Image (cartoon, rainbow, N blue to C red):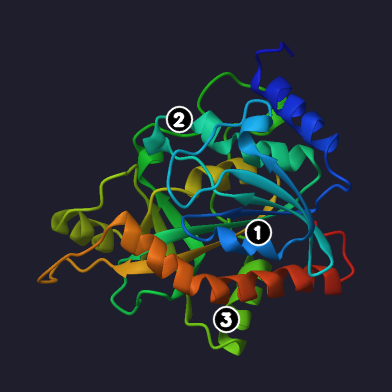
Amino acid sequence: MTTSSLAYQVREAASALRGRLPAMPRVGIILGSGLGPLADEVENPTVVPFAEIPHFAVSTVSGHAGQFVAGTLEGVPVAVLRGRVHFYEGYSLGQITFPVRTLRRLGIDVLILTNAAGGLNAAYHAGDLMVLRDHINLPGLAGQNPLVGADEPELGVRFLDMTDAYDETLRAQALALGASLKVPTHEGTYVAVAGPSFETRAEIRYLRGIGADAVGMSTVHEVIVARQELMRVLAISVITNEADPDAAVADVSHTSVLNVAERAGPGLAAVIRGVVRSLADSGADYDG
């Protein structure tokens, strides 16, 4: 393993973090656009800016603070990434998914991902949550997959089965919590696009036609790597706008996305806290 290999760089990042954390986290949480305030609920936090972690890319997008926050949530040691980087920022898929690999080297085996997404399903409304049951990776189908590149066996299996990428038990818990908390929560299929431009009316019709319920610009690459790294995955979208191809005015902007995400944040946080609490209540070691 050379110093330029991805596996070496991941080990280097994890080693640097171990030296700064009072305890090793067991659950990882990545927060999407406008959803960072959940990190403020972490108790006894240690905050490390992405810029201070070897090989971490730094976010250039409003709503992504770029901080690694470690502490406890519902009594469980967690690492919360306050923001992520995206393909549309000019980063490679290896850079985008690097934090997921680092979380795994720290011992994390449950990964909770969040994002802001446009609602394609006509039954979805701005502020609703959608638990991901499956995804359509349009960039991946066009050749942009984070597993492309030199084969490094330490990172996991290259030819990866993705048929059940989202953990069934975690999904069921999130849906039940949404119902009990009276937070409108659906289960559906997320389609990833490259961004950063929003979709045309024809593209919205196409995405609906291929079976997608929500559309966004992140998450699926992280899921692929988490799957390769043998992590259990829960992913939840906040529906920040209704993508209606027949709307008289299609009024969507990054600012409006952040505003809706902020309003929906407390409900999402309550669901995530409940899922994390269930891991603590189970008395298990969080690896299923």
The earlier-in-sequence mark between 2 and 3 is 2
Height in image: 149 above or below 171? above
For disc 1, the marked residue is 39
Q: CA distance from mark 1 to mark 2?
A: 24 Å
Under mark 3, the amino acid is: Gly
Which residue is tagged 2? 91
> What residue is at 41 percent from the left and 75 percent from the top?
127
Position in image of residue 154 (x %, y %)? 73, 27
> Residue at 36% across / 74% down in the picture?
126
Question: Callout 1, which amino acid?
Answer: Ala
First of labels 1, 3 by sequence position: 1
- Seen at 17% across and 65% down, the residue is 250
| Secondary structure found at label 2 | loop
Q: Along the polypeptide, which appears first: circle 1 or circle 2?
A: 1
Q: Nearer the viewer, residue 182 or 260?
A: 260
Q: Secondary structure at mark 1?
A: helix
Q: Amino acid at mark 2?
A: Tyr
Q: Is residue 62 left or right of residue 178?
A: left
**Disc 1 to disc 2: CB gap under 8 Å:** no
User: Depth check: 123 or 51 in front?
Assistant: 51
The percent coordinates of residue 22 (x first, y second) are 88, 46
Percent of width and height locating residue 168: 63, 67
* In front of the other: 132 or 15: 15
Query: Of tags 2 and 3, which is closer to the observer?
Result: 2
The residue to which callout 3 is attached is 178
